Image (spheres, helix red, strand yellow):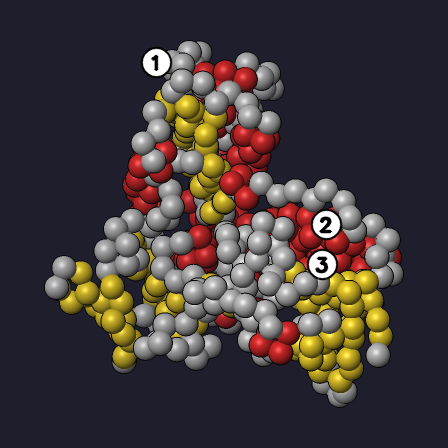
Amino acid sequence: MDSFDLIVIGAGPGGYVCAFRAAQLGLKVALVEKRATLGGTCLNVGCIPSKALLHSSEHVAFAKSHAAEHGIKLGSVEVDLATLMKKKDAVVTKLVGGVAQLAKARKITVVTGSASFVSANTIEVKGEKDSSQLTAKNIVIATGSAPVELPFMKFDGTTIVSSDHAIAFSAVPKKLVVVGGGAIGLELGSVWARLGSDVTVVEFLPKILATYDDDIARNFTRLLQKQGVKVEVGAKVTGFAKGVLTAEREGKKLEFPADKVLVAVGRRPYTDSLGLEKAGVQLDEKKRIQVDAHLRTNVAGIWAIGDVVAGPMLAHKAEEDGVAVAEWIAGKAGHVNWDLVPAIVYTEPEVASVGLGEDAAKAKGLAVNVGKFNFAANGRAIAADATDGYVKIIADAKTDKILGAQILGHGAGELISEIVTHLEYGGSAEDLGRTIHAHPTMSEAVKEAGLAVSKSAIHAL
């Protein structure tokens, strides 16, 4: 039986980053992954392939709708879906190959197969042909999450599909209904709408992007509708039969014809077949692995990170978990600030947030000042046809300390990072507003929003 300082189960962003950091700190590490390639859901069927499709489909949208106004004459624009998918697959292949190279360079033992606990410090890994047992002083569970299935509309991979399937359609569906108005559904809905599908998003709650401020959700909805994506909120899906999805709203029956239905109502922690009961690891009421403030389970030497524990199911959160656990195991001072995990929706325009939104702050009874700055007043945005949306900074009314931010606009996912940095160091809106930003850049809107908290924005009325 092979023995290690650390075994990491799951090679997604949380798992492989944990393994890499532990190896950097001198630990003997094994990384167990059931897929033939490393990178987990994110690199193989999630974040990365979806971003590749978003990028390619943005080019299609530009060619069809905007090229002419820039003096670019293209004639008819046709989508070669097979080539577009081949490009997406090449991106994935390059990245998963890169992770494998890094693992090899760090002398990490990669074991392919499904892991299950034999005891608190021993696991069995079943490969295609054989199985082996590994033991370690520390074991990190990083098995990620899986799409939530609706009990009355189970995935068949053809008509009722998950995001795993929706990144690999062989033809553009004539009518696509997306169940769920969260990031995954809106991103993939955008992709297929740009490629020619008639897309309808059906959301149970009164608005899409439930965690965002009402004004952001409202303005974003308007922009999606302008792009041809239909948005139906407050609608409870009841079933699918004979090519029609049915739903109810205020007692009235709704019908949506669909060639394909993408169910994107969330993800669940994936702990299937891990045999946690053999190790004595406890779950919480939502079937997440229960951990303390240092991501330790109730069993000494067993840790859990990323999507299998409480918190946002985001790759970058899992990465930070992984680094911190590796450092704690190695006797270092690991740290994660779970209050400052940014969230991004990679549509066009993008939507990004960090910390407390205006609505959440007011719901907590906090006195806040809010600074907004529209991209319509930003020189770079005007030059780049990116005037939709705005930056919104939420600051404590007494101290001016930034509490959070939300951005609706082109490149919002990149722009949010500097606000995360200011929040990390306890910065004020004035600090943000007095930080020099290069001109002309979209980021000047962040500076102006910081100034707008004290009604000092230079380029606003």
Q: Disc 3 on helix, strand or loop?
A: helix
Is residue 268 in view from this perspective? no
Q: Position of residue 276 (x, y in %)?
A: 59, 74
From the image, which quarter does the N terminus lie in? bottom right
Alpha-carbon distance for marks 2 and 3?
Answer: 16 Å
Q: Residue at x 38, y 46 (%)?
A: 211
User: What mark, if any, has residue 461 been given in the picture?
Assistant: 1
Q: Mark 1 vs mark 3: which is more N-terminal?
A: 3
How busy is the neighbourhood of tag 2: few (under 14 within 10 Å), some, or many (20 plus)?
A: some
Residue type at mark 1 is Leu
Q: Disc 1 on helix, strand or loop?
A: loop
User: What mark, if any, has residue 16 been given in the picture?
Assistant: 3
From the image, which quarter does the C terminus lie in? top left
User: What mark, if any, has residue 145 been given in the picture?
Assistant: none
Question: In the figure, is residue 410 to the left or right of 197?
Answer: right
Q: Mark 2 vs mark 3: which is more N-terminal?
A: 3
Mark 2 touching mark 3, by CB under 8 A? no
Residue type at mark 3 is Tyr
Residue at numbered disc 2: 328
How busy is the neighbourhood of tag 1: few (under 14 within 10 Å), some, or many (20 plus)?
A: few
Q: Mark 1 vs mark 2: which is more N-terminal?
A: 2
Question: In the figure, is residue 110 to the left or right of 446?
Answer: right
Alpha-carbon distance for marks 1 and 2?
Answer: 51 Å
Residue closest to the far left: 251
